[in-house]
Image (spheres, rainbow, N blue to C red):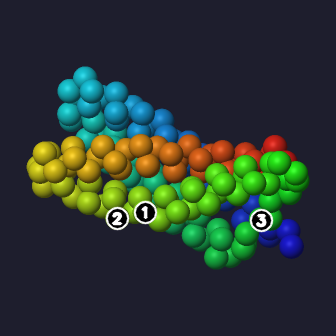
Amino acid sequence: MPVPAQYAIFPVINATLNGASTILLLTGRSLISRRRIAQHRLVMLTAFVTSTLFLISYLYYHFHAGSVPFQGTGRTRPVYFSILISHVLLAIAIVPLLIVTLTRALRDRFDKHRAIARWTFPLWLYVSVTGVLVYFMLYYWFA
């Protein structure tokens, strides 16, 4: 079943939001490593908002348009589904991690923030990058 035309732009929006999150995360990591705390905070809050907008857009799209089946064949199928499954599972796990990480930072509990951010950052980055990868594999590489 094809995606209704009014929802066709959503995969592009979602991939763009994921890509923006990736860039923001890498920028935020660079800023904190240079002890530019105020800029780090602003960029990471922007990354959080971008990821939240992605989640809202993603859920809205899939509620209205359903899912798009993967068209790849052969060896590409297990590669795609391995990436997709790890992406989905970590995307679910990242939500509470992000909330706790952000809450600790906003409450100036930087010792606890750092401890959990060491886990949150790479998982969030993986979810953002693989979100873009899943988009390209689904809509371009094997379509």
- Quadrant assignment for the N terminus: bottom right
Q: Amino acid at mark 1?
A: Ala
User: Going 64% across and 76% down the picture, which residue do you hit?
Assistant: 63
Type of amino acid at the residue the image marks with label 3: Val
Q: Given the image, on which type of amino acid does mark 2 rest?
A: Pro
Tell me the residue at 52%/50% (across/down): 127
Rounded to the nearest angstrom, the CA distance separating label 1 from label 2 is 6 Å
Regarding mark 2 in the picture, which secondary structure is present there?
helix
Residue, disc 2 = 96
Q: Which residue is mark 1?
A: 93
| Residue 49: % across, % down | 40, 54
Q: Is residue 143 visible?
A: no
Give me the residue at 22% from left, 28% from top.
Answer: 36
Of the pair 125 and 115, the residue shown nearer to us: 115
Task: Looking at the picture, tell me which residue is in the foreground, 100 or 62.
Answer: 100
Q: Secondary structure at mark 3?
A: loop
User: Are discs 1 and 2 less than 8 Å apart at CB?
Assistant: yes
